[in-house]
Image (cartoon, rainbow, N blue to C red):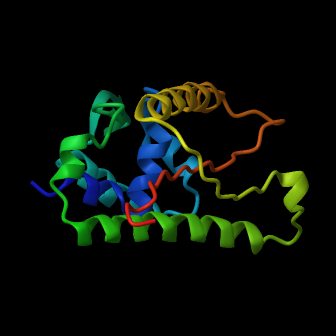
Amino acid sequence: MISKVKVVLHPVRLKIVQSLIGKKELNVQLLSSKLPDVPQATLYRHLNKLLEAEIIKVVKENQIRGTVEKFYSLVDQQVINQDDLHKLSRDEHLQLFLTFMTHLLAKYESYLNQEEIDLFKDGVVYREAIAYLSDDEFNEFVEDLSIIMKKVMDKKPSNERKARHIASIFIPESKGT
């Protein structure tokens, strides 16, 4: 079976997985509304790849006028685990990081290409910081951050809420530095 990591880190499949985080159960129509730039045939193709890789599953089926409406959910909320990552070579890790960065770059370019932007008002932020933490302090920080992220990711869309893409990257300094 192909690596789950390689399956997930395709831009369309990544968007599908992100849409299902939080134990959501969505059908193709709901996924299409969240991914308006993805043609429905393409969406079906990527759903099938995620099904084959056992990243998503069909959780419900409804008969509607001779067709079957399927609802999809993540098999496991932790889509990629440590075992998946340990199996990758250094070159594969670099390629996956490049895919991740390219995805972020595309999001930022899409934002900048809008008719009107206001970076401050829209809350655009990117920064880098170095923190000196023991392993225990770092693990506590990641746990605290995860709790905060879950809290904001559980909020439902509404007229007064904007979708905001939040990414995090933690890279230790190389030992020679």
Q: Residue furthest front?
A: 176
What's the residue at 51%, 53% (across, down)? 169
What's the residue at 14%, 58% (across, down)? 2
- Horizontal side of 112 relative to 63 (left or right) equals right
Position above or below: 123 against 10: above
Position above or below: 100 against 79: below
Q: Position of residue 83 (x, y in %)?
A: 18, 43
Q: Is residue 41 visible?
A: no
- Horizontal side of 18 relative to 148 (left or right) equals left
Q: Is residue 119 visible?
A: yes
Which quadrant of the view contains residue 89? Answer: bottom left
Q: How many marks?
A: 0
Q: Quadrant of the N terminus?
A: bottom left
What's the residue at 76%, 71% (across, down)? 112
- Given residues 5 and 148, the one toward you in this image is 148
Q: Residue furthest left?
A: 1
Q: Position of residue 160 (x, y in %)?
A: 84, 35
Which quadrant of the view contains residue 45? Answer: bottom left
What's the residue at 32%, 51% (across, down)? 47
- Horizontal side of 77 relative to 144 (left or right) equals left
